Amino acid sequence: MARKAKNLARELQLAGWRPGQDIRQCRAFEHFSEACGCSPEGHAIEGAKAELHLGDDADGYTIRDLYENLVVDRRTGEPVGAAFVNEMMDPRHPRNLYEAGGAIGYVDSTAFTGVTGQLLVTKVLEPYQKEEYMVRKMIPTYASPLERERWIGLADPADPTDDQLLVQEGEQFRMFGFGEQYVESPMTKKRGGIIGLTKEAIFFNRTGDITDKASQIGDLLAYNEEKECIGCVVGGATNPIYFIEKRQIDSAPLTLDLFQQASAGSGAYQLSFTYSSRAYPFVNDVPNNPLVDYTSIRTCDQYFSNIVDPNRGRPIVVGKPFVLAPHTKRMDIMQVLYAENIWKNTQQAWGGTTVGALNTVSPNVVSMIGLTSDQFLTSRLLKAELQTQLSLTSHQADYVWFYGDISAAFRYVQNWPVSVVQAPVNSEAEFNQDVVMRWKASKRGTVAIYEPRQWLRNNYRSLSSGT
């Protein structure tokens, strides 16, 4: 293990790093950061897989070895070694190096803090790869420098009639105008936590302590992000996210619920209620449609066929639809997807005198229309959020599911990804609590509704009697 830390120290020095310099400008440090799955500034690189990590096993770096080999003497440039750690931190030593003529001031720890910070990024990011955090993975990320993003575009021109397109010989072509439209995201939110490295963790080589802290913070960040995304895609009532859009037909932007119902008076922001006169209202909250067989998918397609583009009045195109359901429905999904035939059982006559008939109605059409197993997704957290966000019972939540192009319906607005920043050395925490180093893991972003016409919620019962 010490050999690996020594090799890393040697690589940094051969690449031109010297005590007192910014280690992030060293080419070897850039390569090391890439292997950790992050940028030299400590930002996570989305989709990158870490090849290096901080851990107690044979393939990882340990805290004490990194400290011994990457903290160097400013005068000689040589690593301080194990003796320095023992003298600096051993309470049995008669004169601690903090008091020994400023000996601590002669060392440079930038390589240690920089390398350890990059390795901590990999530990913070590990929980993001958990299977149960899959809804966030389905929503594309939109990098933004703004607290609230506004996607501005030009509305498509209204469909012209044949007479409008007709041009006589020598006649001037007609100009078709474009109208302003935009979609606005909610305000982004910052979340994070602090990871502290104590003297004891270095001296007793408690690498597992700091990796556990980093992993816990990463799991809290990933779990919170997943809950936020699920709350948005289900139309949750806890910290609700509304859809704000300005279309060509609108004089001002409208704030709408994600899911629109057919019944009047169903909500303060429903199109059929407050904005019933608005052109091309859509309905994407489907009653009485549990996931049973191909007929459930057919009902969704029928709803999509009635949803049109609000500017041109043309049917929308759903790119790659996905089925999202609670994890408890995974067995039912397999039956829907892989059934070879659809059978119908004719009920026997009253009194049992006539035997019912079992007939094949048709082959299963789900796979025939192109829906494959990778388009049927289940989430372990979805059911719990349905109960919390929509006040459903456990039985009701089992039968609520969603259908549509989730990547077209939502976006995750990100100001910055998960990043790890080091606190200044010789801080108050070091003096009061023996916290030698501190790193802050943080992120800022929010999920936003981009196009609700691409997403359907399917309910177990009629909306008037409860979902």
Image (tube, rainbow, N blue to C red):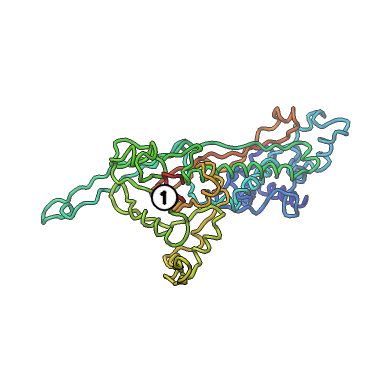
113 sits to left or right of 91: left
Question: Circle 1 sits in a helix, a strand or a loop, which is it?
Answer: loop
- Mark yes or no: residue 41 visible: no
Residue located at (15% from left, 55% from top): 166
Residue 225, percent from left and from top: 55, 43
Q: Residue at x 28, y 49 (%)?
A: 312
Left/right placement of residue 85 relative to residue 167 reads right
At label 1, the amino acid type is: Pro
User: At 44% from the left edge and 67% from the top edge, which residue is drawn?
Assistant: 349
State the image quarter where residue 112 is shown: top right
Work out whether 295 lies above or below 387. Answer: below
Q: At which x and y percent is residue 9?
A: 72, 47
- Find residue 86 and report its image quarter: top right
Q: Which residue is mark 1?
A: 287
Residue 85 image point, x, y percent: 81, 39
Name the quadrant containing residue 152.
top left
